[in-house]
Each structure stands twice: as structure tokens, then as C-alpha cells.
Amino acid sequence: MSTAVLVLENGQVFRGSSYGAVGETLGEAVFCTAMTGYQETLTDPSYHRQIVVATAPQIGNTGWNEEDGESTGSAGSDSSTGDSGKIWVAGYAIRNPTRRVSNWRATTSLEDELHRQGIVGIAGIDTRTVVRVLRDHGSMRAGVFSGPALASDDDLVARVRNQPEMTGADLAGEVTTDGMYTVEPDGDVRFTVAAVDLGIKTNTPRMFAQRGVRVHVLPSTAGLDAITDLAPDGVFLSNGPGDPATADAVVDLTRGVLGNGVPLFGICFGNQILGRALGRSTYKMKFGHRGINIPVIDHVTGTVSITAQNHGFALEGEAGEEFDTDFGRARVSHVCANDGTVEGVELLSGRAFSVQYHPEAAAGPHDAAYLFDKFVTLLEGDRAQGTRA
């Protein structure tokens, strides 16, 4: 293996070995605390333009397979063939790469797949130290360099600092589907949902399909007319990358959906979009929440769910806070038990709600899967009351 370096915006340099492709990659350095599910992490469009530092010490044990990817339907993937394997992370930094793949579903090794897709990575660094730096100083711009991309430390630091910051980054359009596609349900069609793809993961339409819901996945550029023409029973706002403060068009779309009285459900980036549509502002977090072990308190029921999360921005607000909106009273419904970050908002009417975490959590945990049932129950009540045709 050839030499590779991870260079942080603050000037710190970590030297290791190349892992995956050789060359140069730039992005925001973030860390993920998940002990499992690295394939789901790497293929999550929400990680677009980020260099992920894995806190788990050994990575690659189960290799790479053709089933567990999360990027079907996104730009650059083929939704018609079910190709979910596109890697969206800008780079990958790990401690100990496994020497042997051990899983009956594996079709290749993780390193070979990183190399095949041109993802520049680094192994053999003290990821504990890197994570401590990011926790103390915040997520920051970074780069991984190997082979002909290597140069003096000063030159590499300059390259890192010359890239754009994540604040102000409008990235949903870079990961969204190129055109509408439909995921049919298992069995009879009970309801139809229009899903706005801001970086949707494969498992989300699958979770709807298991509940008898046909999902029309639309590009992030879709207007209100495109949704109205489908006459859906409900609308879904997906997860995605970038700064929610740049997503004015999707916020306007959401306000139009709310104004038309269509039931709405959002997750992650979709939570921030719904929050903005309800008049709340967003901010960039110091180092964000990324992992599958983050506790969230539901202030309506008092229950705590262990959740999967991946976000570096959040909504302003306080636990249990109620506020007025153009669509009726709303409240902050969920917060993170670790730091009080807003993890969900909802209209008191119950016709729109969202959470900051991932109830579809393909790599687990599944504590929050009930939210899909909650949305289907809302659609059932809407139909029973004849609120919509």
C-alpha cells in the first residue's frame, strides 16, 4: 500500500496508507459512530461531499454485496435495474482494514469496491484522535491525498482551505433522481404517496411498499403542479445533503402542499424543510449527529427511541415548544436526549409531521419504524373523513 494523508482545515495532518482509489478527494470531515452498516453509510446520498471517519476500529469484515446499498433512484444510479451501490461519500478514513472478507453475500471486498468507484480513502490512522479533534473544533474541510496527489503539507492544507464550505451548499439537486419513477407496493395498493427525492434512500419506498403504499418518487425540482397532477393521498419529504437554508424552492413547494391540506411526512432534511415552511430557522451544528445509536425523546408520549441519524444542520427550537404558523399551531415534538437538538416538529392538527432521524434505518435500529404506520393511519383517517377525494 502506498502512503496517504488526511489533511484537516486546521492544519493537522494524519499519515497512513492508501485505501481504495489513489489520488485526491476534498470534502467536509465528519465522523460516524455506527459499529455496523458501513455499506449503507457509504451509499447514503446524505453523505455527498463528506469525508467519513469511521469510529469503529475495524472496517470491511463483511465485504461488499449487491443488496445493501441505499442509493437507488439517485442521480448516477439506475433505478430501473435496482442498482443501489453508488457510493456518495467523498472519501473514507478508517483505522484497521480487515484482511479477510467473511460473509456469504459478499461479491467483492470493500477496498476493491472503493477502488472500482474511484473513492479515495486512507487506512491506518488513529481515528480516535481525528474524532476528538472534530468533536473539540467541529466538522471542518478536509482532504485525502495519495500517489501523485501528494505534495508538501503547506500545499495540501492550502488545497483543503480553497474548497467551499458546507454552509451555503445547495446539494440536493446533485443527488436527486433524474426523472420520476414508481415503487409499487407489496400486494394491493391502499394509498399513493408522492415522495420528493432530496437524497432518498432505497429502504424508504420499501417501508411504504410493505404497508400497501405506491410511491411516486419525484426530482427535487418538482413543482406543486407535478404533485397535484398525481393526486396523491400524501406527500413525503426525504433525507438529503447540504444546507437547508438554500432549499427555498422545496420550502415553497412544502408550503403549497400544506396549504392544499395534503397530509405530509418528512425525515432528516425533510424535517428541516417542514420546519422552515412552518417559519423556523436552521443552523449548522458543531459536529452533527451521525450513527445508529442516538437517543431521541418523544415529548408527546414520553418514550425514548434509539435512532439512526446523519445530519450536520438542525432546526432552532426548544423541547415541547409550541408556536403559531400559517397552517395552525405547531410544536417541537422530539428532541435529542444527548444535547437537546430538535428532532421533530408537527402541526397540532396532526396533518403534517417530521423527524430529524431515520425511521427507515436499513442497518438498524428499528425503534422508529412505527412512524410509517403513523403516516398510514393519518391517510386512513383522511380517507374515512372524506377530507380528500
Image (cartoon, helix red, strand yellow):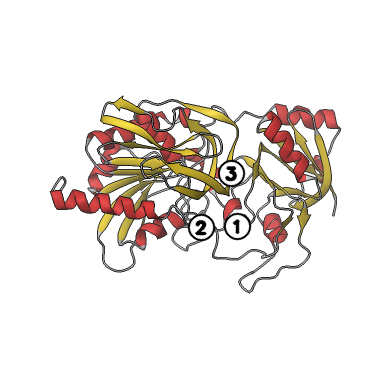
Check contact, mark 2 vs mark 1: CB within 8 A.
Answer: yes
Front residue (pair 182, 303): 303
Q: Which residue is mark 1?
A: 37
Numbered disc 1: secondary structure: loop
Q: Which residue is mark 2?
A: 362
Q: How many labels were placed on the picture?
A: 3
Distance from the alpha carbon under mark 3 to that under mark 1: 12 Å
Distance from the alpha carbon under mark 3 to that under mark 2: 14 Å
Q: Earlier in the sequence, mark 2 or mark 1?
A: 1
- Can see residue 250? no
In the picture, measured across the screen, residue 118 lies left or right of residue 200, that is right
The picture places residue 226, in percent across and down from the top left corner, at: 29, 42
Q: Which residue is mark 3?
A: 290
**Residue lying at 57% horizontally and 31% vertically, measured from the top left:** 285
Farthest residue to the front: give it: 302
Distance from the alpha carbon under mark 2 to that under mark 1: 8 Å
Check contact, mark 3 vs mark 1: CB within 8 A.
Answer: no
**Residue lying at 56% horizontally and 38% vertically, measured from the top left:** 338
User: Are there few (<14), some (14-19), or many (20+) residues within 10 Å of tag 3?
Assistant: many
The picture places residue 181, in percent across and down from the top left corner, at: 37, 54
Numbered disc 2: secondary structure: loop
In the picture, measured across the screen, residue 260 lies left or right of residue 266, that is left
Front residue (pair 286, 222): 286
- The relative height of residue 78 versus residue 331 in the rendered view (above or below) is below
Mark number displayed over residue 342 = none
Image quadrant containing the N terminus? bottom right
Q: Earlier in the sequence, mark 3 or mark 2?
A: 3
- Identified by mark 2, the residue type is Ala
- Identified by mark 3, the residue type is Arg
